[in-house]
Amino acid sequence: MKNDDIELIQRILSEDESAFAELVNKYQKQVHALAWRKIGDFHIAEEITQDTFLKVYQRLHTLKDPNLFSGWLYVITANLCASWYRKKRLQTQPLEDIEDTMSETDVYSEHVAEERTKTDAETQREVVKKLLAKLKESERTVMTLHYLGEMTVEEISKFIGVSAGTIKSRLQRARNRLQKEETMIREALEHFQISPNLTTNILQEISRLKPTPSSSKPLIPWTVVASTAVLIVLMLGIGNQHLARFQRPYSFDAQTEMSVELVEAPIVQDMVVVPEVRNQIGSNNAVGKSDTPRPNPDEVLLAAVDTEGTDKGSVSEEWIAGNVPGISDNVRTVLATTDRNIYLIDYNENLYKSAFDGTEWEQVSNLRTFLSDDRWVDKIPLAEFNDTLYIVILNEIFASTDGGETWNSVGECPKADIVDLAVKDETFFLAAEHGVFISKDSGETWEAINNGLKEAVISLDLIQDTLFLSTDTGIYSTGLYRFVVDRWEPVEFPVADITHIRSFAGTDDILYMMAVLDLGDLWNDNNISQYWWLYRSTDKGNSWTEITPKNAHSIFGNQLSFENEPLASLVVKKNTVLIIGWDTGSVIRSSDTGNTWTHVTSTGISVIPGSVQDAVGINDSTFYIYGESGIYRTFDGGISWSRYNTEPKSGLNNLTFVNRGKEKNTSGSLYAMTREEVFKSTDKGKSWHVVNPEKGLKIGIPTSSRIVESGGTLYAKCKSTFEPQIVTLYRLSDTRKTLIPIQGMPVFDSRNLWELLNKQETISPHEGIAAIAKMFAKGSDKSYIEELQKSSVGATQFFKQLAMAHHGQLTMIRRRGLHGMFAVSGNIFYMEYNFKLFRWEPGDTEWYDTGQEETVMFTRDLLKKDLKLAVSGNTVYVGKRDGKLMASFDKGTNWIDFTSALPFPVNDYKQILFAGTTVYIATDAGVVRSENGKNWHAISDPDGINPTMEHLAADDTRLYGYIKDTGIYRLESGTWKQIISEIPDDITSMVVDGNTLYVSTETQGMLHYTLE
């Protein structure tokens, strides 16, 4: 029998340790399912699950109503997932997930057998993720929680704060959409097993959090502590009228019991107390609106602190922060108002505002003020009429007349899952998942208007004084209704085979819709020549005229759909009509209501799955879009787009500078990476524009993982989005706007290898010693290793360890094998793939094996390292993970081991680069240089110490280095000289152009420094 939450919480607060273990066991699958749904990585979801319960343990005493524990747990999990996204912005498994070593003892332990039993199914998970991707966000969550989290409809309802009826409907719709695959998804999700040690790990972490108990009773009774705390507060002049602001712990029994939690916090005597107003958030000092003047985000001056030893005359005394093409928190609502302002609400309930042509977002309030820590809402509809904003939260409508800074309650609305809101005069229209409601007296009374409505509602539009509803009819499929007199009527389509729409929009004069065939027709008939149409209507949908752009049917699909299926959003304003691809970055535009069309390919929109989810228009030249890659806007009617995010300082690395010519000039460009995208700036980081790779791989949309510069050209290592085993190199196009495949270069492809590994026999722990012996035999089977080697290319050690690795190790070794470095010298290309170094030149039909590969056991520490690679002309230097330094002077045909020639022992190579004819190598023991590869010299500072540099950068022949927590150094007359002593944050990459030093940092974005 399951323990009641209230009873468990009471026992936990009474310091019953077993009760918390029961709570973890009860909810861990649910939490893990939600984290996996949001993050997409099974193992990282386990880490977030652990962090969630640690936070629950630390904050359980703050939960006011234990009946709301389930929803409170959901909020904590969702917030930790959002925090992970902000910090990581990467879709890779952390190295910490793998074992400390990968010895044979490890591999053939009983733990290995259990791990292999859990899943041999990384591929199966990926297939399930792709199938679930066909569903709406809300349906994916319900399916995952139901099957993976093993939750009932009622439990899901409490967990995510949505009615049980809605959960049932979402689950049924999901099943209907995936009728053929539902059994496979159910079985796959039910067999995904989280770590059996998860509860134990959580309890161990909690034991570390607990202070060592005293052997005697406290010297001062808690009642005295509480009284003293209250007395101090009163002495500071706060006043007893504000004591209610202190946290009152939830009490199960006593009526007047009180406890005080002691926290470390500064005492500030001067306090400004804002009177509390019911149903109102914000004030003249609203949350998110600081009195402190906001600096210009393009040029924030950070004064460098002078320290002894710094040459003040050699550098300017300030860092300048540039804008960074970061990624916003996921956006749930965007609204364009009649006064040409843009409002958005993110998934942290922050409300942001910007002028349509503004330079930064202003956070005007946080709508979580309407919610306790125990509650979460799926959607927050936002509308505007007559200079007043309206929102719906928890079945109550609020209004703001000051741009969202303060909100006042308008009144309650029907208790339903509200998805959209429209306002005109004193009439409110509410769309819920299962119906529509109208109030003609500003929210005082409500009436349901559902006559004729048969499908779940997605959105509501009030266009030309007519109500239109978009309804849910299937995967990527939407129905369209309009309200006529007293009932909803389906909009009649001009072609009998068309039953659904993909997108719908309208102006004061014209309606537009993108109509599509039923998805079943697409599945059953691959010979259909036309899948979608674009229509317009000038009589509120009574008649339609086709305006489909010619030769535009194949630019919006991806491999999760049919190639010609239109995955696109439609947005219109005045005479401008835009069709914007969700994944492709393409825009088809018309400036004459659809009479003529132009296809724009190099738009500046990132080419990644889900890059565009929706769009809004301000005027006929200004539009906003948002999706997985952030927020974009255009001022030229959709021709060019630039990012405009709420959090500009997020994730930036791999800084690279490219000059167009041999001489230094102003035409050089700065390139950088964030997530799996490449960006370009020509104004020292003030603005950034995406550089998309063109389709060139066999499958899917390519994404980038590394960039390098060579000979005034940028090169990128790209992989297929949904088949990461396919890897090749791209280069910057002649227009310098896109990345294009290098002509004639073969691709690396390990799909056959991964398929073989996925077919490895699953070992059950019930087989005991026999199972372990079977695994040992498999790892020692030369014929099996040879079979793996025939399926792909790579280091021999790579295949040996794949053959005997358990699942967690297998996943990490495979991923790291695709993560290798590459370098370019003229028309000669070098790339590491599966821990082996290859070379290719134009005219070659395959990559040449240079003979350099990793030969030592892949431990966790070794897998954390990258091969270090640098080339110049025919000279190649390789710093291997095992500490060996290899060099070739004939393009990698013959090699010399220079390890013993170094002036000190080296375990780890940090960077190798050429500056002129001199090669510099940063190691864990210091930096060395050589002019001829034979004689090596350590580089010291004025005190004769060999400093360890984390990063090197060169401008022609001048070398710069960075030491963490110490500063920036320049090599002058063969000696390191410190030139910058204060750096606002840890540096992740560094590049120099003339007298400008650029750095990317952990949390401060990109900074540049002017050198004198």
Image: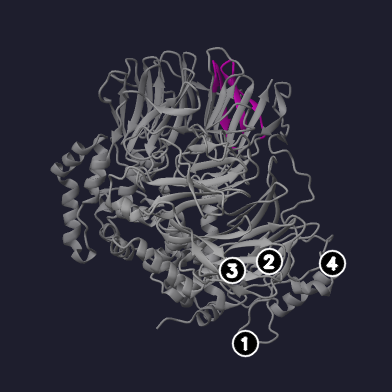
Q: Main SS of the magenta segment?
A: strand
Mark 2, residue position: 427
Which percent across, then down, holds residue 534? 47, 45
Please name the amino acid that badge 1 sits on. Asp
Q: Is residue 86 left or right of residue 263?
A: left
State the separation of the CA atoms marked 2 and 3: 43 Å
Specify whether residue 969 is painted magenta.
yes
Which percent across, then down, holds residue 408? 74, 66
Mark 3, residue position: 59
Specify whether residue 118 is painted magenta.
no
Please name the amino acid that badge 2 sits on. Thr
At a point 40% along the width and 65% down the height, the residue shown is 173
- 510 in relation to 880, above or below: below
Q: How crowded is mark 4: few (under 14 residues within 10 Å), some or many (20 or more)?
A: few
Residue mark closest to the camera, 2 vs 1: 2
Which percent across, then down, holds residue 519? 35, 54
Residue mark closest to the camera, 2 vs 3: 2
Which percent across, then down, holds residue 396? 65, 70
- The answer to whether mark 4 and mark 3 are in CB contact below 8 A is no
Mark 4, residue position: 236
Q: How crowded is mark 2: few (under 14 residues within 10 Å), some or many (20 or more)?
A: few
Is tag 2's residue or tag 3's residue first in the polypeptide sequence? Answer: 3
Mark 1, residue position: 253
State the separation of the CA atoms marked 4 and 1: 33 Å
Query: Which residues fall within the magenta stretch?
Result: 954-982
Q: What element carries label 3?
A: helix
Residue 264 can be seen in this image: yes
Q: Is mark 4 on a helix, strand or loop?
A: loop
